[in-house]
Image (tube, grey):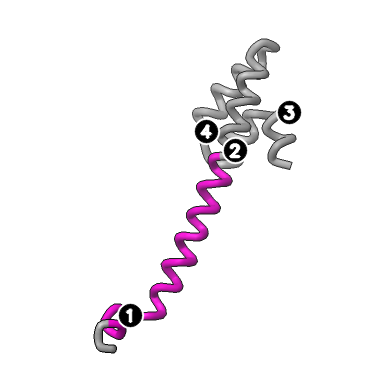
Amino acid sequence: MRFLTAVVFPWFTFLSIGRIKQARISMALQLTVVGWLPAAIWALRTSRRHVHAMTYLGAAIAAARGRQLVLPTEKDSR
């Protein structure tokens, strides 16, 4: 779904991840036929980076929550 949105409406991809300035630039590019392809490629790359960043952030949060269960002082006393 995100791939299709990035190709058809590149500006909406930027809005969905909270990048308003990039959405405006992308919309200006999309208004021209020549600029649509660069805007779509830019949106695809940004969308992929956003998905990967959110995946790693989720893993980091899960790891941090897992570490909170074992306190460092308990490890040292064993």
Q: Which residue appears at 74% of the width and 42% of the height?
A: 1
Residue ID for mark 1? 71
**Earlier residue among tags 3 and 4:** 3
Image position of 19 with respect to 39: above or below: below
Q: Are marks 3 and 2 in contact (CB under 8 Å)?
A: no
**Earlier residue among tags 1 and 2:** 2
| Boundaries of the magenta span | 49-75
Between label 3 and label 4, give the one nearer the viewer: 3
Between label 3 and label 2, give the one nearer the viewer: 2
Residue ID for mark 4? 20
Quadrant in the rendering for residue 60: bottom left
Residue 44 picture location, percent across and down: 62, 32
Mark 1 element type? loop
Q: Any mark on residue 47, and which?
A: 2
**Earlier residue among tags 1 and 3:** 3
Q: Are marks 1 and 2 in contact (CB under 8 Å)?
A: no
Q: Is 62 part of what is drawn in magenta?
A: yes
